[in-house]
Amino acid sequence: MPQLFFAGLSVIVAGGLAALVPSRTPGRMERVFAALVAAGCVLVALAALRVLVGGDAWEVRVAASVPGGAWVFGIDALSAFFLVAIAGVGAAAAVYGATYLAAERSHGGVPFAHAAVAVLLVTLALVVTARAVVPFLLAWEVMAIANFLLVMFDHERADTRRSGIIYLVATHTATLTLIGMFAIWSASAHDLTFASLARAASTPAAGLGAVLVLALFGFGVKAGFVPLHFWLPGAHAAAPSHVSALMSGLVIKTGIYGLLRVIALAGGAPEWCGWTLLGLGVVSGVLGVVWALAQHDIKRLLAYHSVENIGIILIGMGVGALGTAYGLPAVAALGYAGAILHVLNHAVFKGLLFLGAGAVTRAAGTRRLDALGGLGRLMPMTWLAFLLGSVAIVGLPPLNGFVSEWMIVQALLGAGLGKGAIRAAVFGVAALGLIGGLALACFTKVNGVVFLGRARTAEAAAGREVGPGLFVPMLGLAAVCTLIGLLPAFVVRPALAAAEVVIGGDAGAHTVDPGTGAAWVGAAAAALIAFAAMGWVAYRVLMRDRSRVVAQTWGCAFSNPTPRMQYTATSFAAPVLEPFGAVAGLSVSHQGEEYRTHPRDPWLEGVILPAWRRLRAAVARAQELQLGRLHVSLLYVFATVVALLWYLASRQVP
Amino acid sequence: MSWSPLVAFGVTLLVAPALPGVATRTRSFLTGRRGPPVLQLYYEIAKLLRKRAVYSATTTWVFRAGPIVGLAAAVLSACLLPLDGRGALAGFPGDFVLFAGLLALGRFGLILAALDTGSSFEGMGASREAMVGAFAEAGLFLSFTALVMATGQPALTGMLGAPLAAGWSASLPALVMIGVSLFVLLLAEASRVPVDDPATHLELTMIHEVAVLDQSGPDLALVLYGSALRFTLLAALTALVLAPRGALAAPAALVALPMGLLVIAAVVGVVEATMARLRLNRVPQLLVATSALAAFAMILVLARS
């Protein structure tokens, strides 16, 4: 129902405008903003769910006669799946943000930040529903700019400005590439609607190879897989936490959406594209988690985990593409569906983890892992939500991360049992195992160093639980993680329907039985929770009549332990990182008795920035042409016009 | 699928504490000592369950939940293995991911419980557990995947049950390689030589022992039983790969279960008696080599068909 969808968007816009209205009671308009955005998200989610539960997909022509073809918007299962993630995480982040930024009201930029969040959510929804090139690119660009403004919220800090500029350069390079991609593609198309592009793709010689390479680059920069991830950690860390949640959960997923939509419109990805996606996925997954382990800043660490999870999504997409290319519809359906489900799962648990990181930052005043500790006692709600998010992101049962990992593994196994070269894809399972093991090390590190043990600094010791405005959205997202883990069939079916859109036709999904396996996974999750609960009750009964002895932590006969003696994030990660050597990107400094490690991104610091500096030096030479005198500039204009006329005159008129 | 998987499940839970005893006893015998009784762990667990527990003032509920979650996960993963050689209590395509995930969840709980104490020693143990787990996971996934490729069965009941027994001799070299790599993973998961030494007395060199340093009383009993059960499950897995019992009659397969477990435990003892433990930073190399072995097994299987 288009009306419901556009009504939802209007309500979100109204919420954004409400945030700008000055009010004498501080916080009143922030509450109005949160309520309106949440209500708008509910409407958008309802419109999407209608399609997912079997309602008809729809398309509307909003502006029928404009240059560049009609503006078409529509929801099919693929759009709907992304919309559900956008609405769910968007509502949680907006509600959280209304309280979160209240502490910085003196800053002055707060109302604009809220309005930008509303714009970001609306453009996200438009990006995944646009069915024509012009509205897609417009929404894409406004989304990128709203996002840039939000990243620059703390623009007084130099590192924020640096991260913001890197993000801006990266996102515009991506947009430029996408314009090029659509230009090549639409050369043989009737107009600029996606339907025409799809028809043009089926006629040969449209340069589909070039289109796919440009799409991989343009959408890849947004998705942030290695080696295009260089802008991601800095921008995620610099933004306010609820914006980081939106970026990591939703904005980078538009890159994945773009790739899936291009594959759908192009009528399937060729073999090389599948292998490329799979390879990029393995590299991003492993390097992302290794670099995450090396981080000392909780938000940078979470940002690198986004690189890792995008890698997992790409593994699913890669095996899905291979499944189509090798004629294995079940593999294609499972691979794409696993990837699409992981998009939702990652949006939920990574959104949750960034919100948790924000709560920790508010409570203890720092993002430095080694300055925290013991916050679990002081912030029980935040800690519970963060712990559930951690279990989910590591891909452990009984939560949602496990479900999508299980689906992608099944797709890989199906590929291995197929015929021909596709069987080699089965080695992707090993990558998933390694990624899971390393992610476990990383998240035990975060939870242990931030929430367990004793506070390492006075600030951490003074941490207090955040208010319900912050922890309720977190617990809501944690509940979603649990529900998907317990009732996976309710998301596996829609994910398969969305995968059907990508594959085209209904070739794949019917060969997969989503019910039985998913029901078993849900039953196993329930059994696990039941076993643990029974164990807990039995333990309480056993210990009922015994007095509790509380003593100091056993220090192997050393009786006066201090918080400084605890293992730190650095020391915890050291043995895991050592085998990775230089790849881990750690540099070590000794100073007297002090030993420190400094994480650096080998790709950004070692390759991208030096290349950028060299480029800038080369361009600076060209700058000498620009003398700043009027008559020289006029001469340039004259020369250009003459050259253009010469070119037009020399072209033969058909 | 009648009573036999249930009996096998019960037998496994029952004999689990004997396995570390058998391994230690074999090691003692081979190194010229008598060693503790085989049933020592049963006594210890019984004694600990009757005692009170001492908790560090630093700890929270996580410290107590860790061992419980670990045990619950291990019991549930026991339901997934076809312990009687043919059928499991529960199974579905891709259930080995759940099996591996449950082992990982147990490790997750144990590591957090260790970090909950704020002790530098337990932090050390936790970090090393995480390291071993991180590098063992790929090998475990590869071994299971190679089994799937060898049998064409995506569920544990199939890849370890009758289909494996039927095609066993055809892919023997690959299966031996998988069996060896699972055995090394067993040594890592159960904290035995050459990865860890359960008999060491210096905390600085420990892995698992030092991570549970603060556990006492019934909590320690749960930890001990949980790790014995994980040892048993990986031993059962190794035994199923190296000597599938899918072709045996149900009673014979049931009798063979504890025998196989005890043999594997004895082999662990022999390894412990004949090998020194590795330097800690060599452990990842061993585990990567194990994964490579499993990968070669997979190449063999893929090349065959």
Image: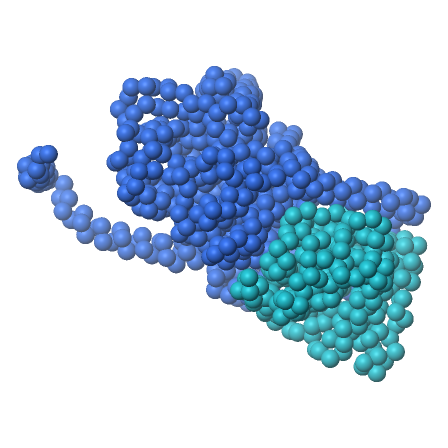
Chain colours: A blue, B cyan
Which residue in the rendered view is the most extreme toward the bottom?
Answer: B32
Q: Nearer the viewer, residue B293 or A9?
A: B293
Q: Nearer the viewer, residue B166 or A427?
A: B166
| Residue A371 place in picture, x, y as percent | 60, 50
Residue A172 located left or right of residue A512 = left
Q: Nearer the viewer, residue B6 or A439?
A: B6
* Residue B108 makes an appearance in the image: no
Residue in the image at 31% along x and 29% along y: A192
| Residue A515 place in picture, x, y as percent | 65, 37
Residue in the image at 48% along x and 31% along y: A79
* Residue A603 placement: quadrant: bottom left
Residue A121 located left or right of residue A568 = left
Residue A244 located left or right of residue A548 = left
Quarter holding the C terminus of chain A? top left
Residue in the image at 69% along x and 61% along y: B166
Residue in the image at 30% along x and 41% along y: A204
| Residue B38 place in picture, x, y as percent | 88, 69
In the image, residue A83 sits, relative to residue A611, either above or below, namely: above
How many numbered marks have been drawn onto this rendered protein structure?
Answer: 0
In the image, residue B204 sits, relative to residue A417, either above or below, namely: below
| Residue A356 place in picture, x, y as percent | 60, 39
